[in-house]
Amino acid sequence: MRGLLRRSDVVGLAGDAERDLKARGRLALDRYATVPSAHLEILAQRVLARRAASGDV
């Protein structure tokens, strides 16, 4: 650990780590923050569309 603290580029190393962490956080949010479509809602919309197409209401 002391060797790491003596490095002259420790500020650059910390900046790289921060940018990497932010990028990973954005990827995780993009992957898991999207709300999937409601399956039953999609099925209900298809049924209504079929009924409208066939003339049954």
Image: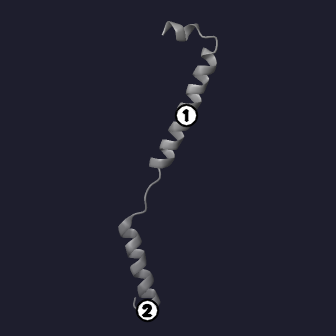
Residues at marks 2 and 1, CA–CA distance in whole angstroms: 52 Å
* Residue drawn at 47 percent across, 52 percent down: 34
Q: Which residue is mark 2?
A: 54
- Asked if the residues shown at circle 2 and circle 1 are in contact, with their CB atoms under 8 angstroms apart, the answer is no
Rendered residue at 49%/44% (across/down): 29
Tell me which numbered mark, 2 or 1, is placed earlier along the sequence.
1
Residue 24: x and y in percent read 52, 37
Q: Can you tell which quarter of the image residue 52 is in?
A: bottom left
Q: Viewer-proximal residue, 10 or 45?
A: 10
Specify the amino acid type for callout 1. Answer: Lys
Q: Nearer the viewer, residue 6 or 23?
A: 6
Task: Tell me residue 43's x, y (percent).
Answer: 38, 73
Percent of width and height locating residue 10: 60, 15
Q: What x and y, as percent, mark residue 26?
A: 53, 41
**Which residue corresponds to mark 1?**
22
**SS type, badge 2:** helix
Task: Answer few, some or many: residues within 10 Å of disc 1's Cα (few below 14, many 20 plus, some between 14 and 19).
Answer: few
Figure check: 49 above or below 21: below
Quarter of the image containing the C terminus?
bottom left
Secondary structure type for disc 1: helix
In the image, taking residue 51 as reference, residue 9 lies left or right, namely: right
Instruction: Check disc 2 and give the amino acid type.
Output: Ser
